[in-house]
Amino acid sequence: MAAKGHTKEPRLVLEGSKWFVENQQKKPDLVVNITEIKQIVFVSNVEDSVVTIKGKVNGVVVQGVKRSGIIFDDVVANVEVINSQKVQIQANGAVPNISVDKTHGATIYVQSAAGKKVEIVTSLSSEVNVVTPGATADSDPKEQAIPQQFVTVFDSNGHLVTKPVEHVGV
């Protein structure tokens, strides 16, 4: 009888223009070498691992990942993080869009000036933080939380206006 849990074979393979990094556990050194800009990387069912994507990639999809890091250079389209827990996403270059959906605990490291042009969209997610380098090489990194609590009110014209809850004091 098979043991409980996921027993699918680990994969790190290129099929056509799609890379699949799947079913990996406790692998700190998984590397995907992008050879063409049209390639997309799918990372799924990965735990306690680090995936490094080298080269300019069209897109990255991270799904069902736990306690792992995804590091990449430039992304042409977007990075999607779905149904994951305690993930670290590190953008070393340009990335136009990062979406985080149904994820608990995501830290997004934006390492370059080009990366700071990113649009980050979150949905049904909690504990999402963005970390950028300090002002100087000797400065501490700056960590900022993405709000997960909002307040909605009617304005004087009867339209709904929504903004993040601001906590003062403490």
Image (cartoon, rainbow, N blue to C red):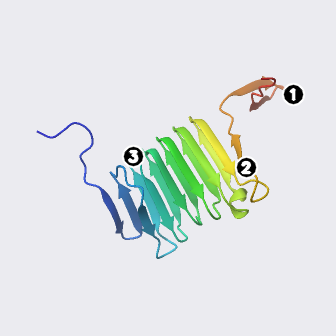
| Sequence order check, earlier mark of 3 and 1 | 3
Q: Which residue is mark 3?
A: 47
Where disc 2 sits, the SS reads loop
Q: Which residue is mark 1?
A: 157
The disc at residue 136 is none
* Residue 166, position as x, y percentages in the image: 78, 28
Left or right: residue 11 versus residue 31 is left
* Residue 132, position as x, y percentages in the image: 70, 52
Residue drawn at x 72%, y 57% is: 116
The disc at residue 140 is 2
The Cα–Cα distance between marks 1 and 2, rounded to whole angstroms, is 44 Å
Three-letter amino acid code at the position of disc 2: Asp
Where disc 1 sits, the SS reads loop
Residue drawn at x 53%, y 51% is: 80
The Cα–Cα distance between marks 3 and 1, rounded to whole angstroms, is 50 Å
| Other-residue count near label 3 (Cα within 10 Å), few / some / many at <14 / 14–19 / ≥20 | many
Q: Which residue of the protein is positioned furthest toward the left in this rendering?
A: 1
- Nearest the camera: 99 or 169? 169
**Can you tell which quarter of the image residue 153 is in?**
top right
Q: Which residue of the protein is positioned furthest toward the front in this rendering?
A: 138
Disc 3 vs disc 2: which is toward the camera?
A: 2
3 and 1 marks in contact (CB < 8 Å):
no
Quadrant assignment for the C terminus: top right
Three-letter amino acid code at the position of disc 1: Asn
| Other-residue count near label 1 (Cα within 10 Å), few / some / many at <14 / 14–19 / ≥20 | few
**Can you tell which quarter of the image residue 110 is in?**
bottom right
| Sequence order check, earlier mark of 1 and 2 | 2
The Cα–Cα distance between marks 3 and 2, rounded to whole angstroms, is 29 Å
Three-letter amino acid code at the position of disc 3: Glu
Left or right: residue 3 versus residue 69 is left
| Sequence order check, earlier mark of 3 and 2 | 3
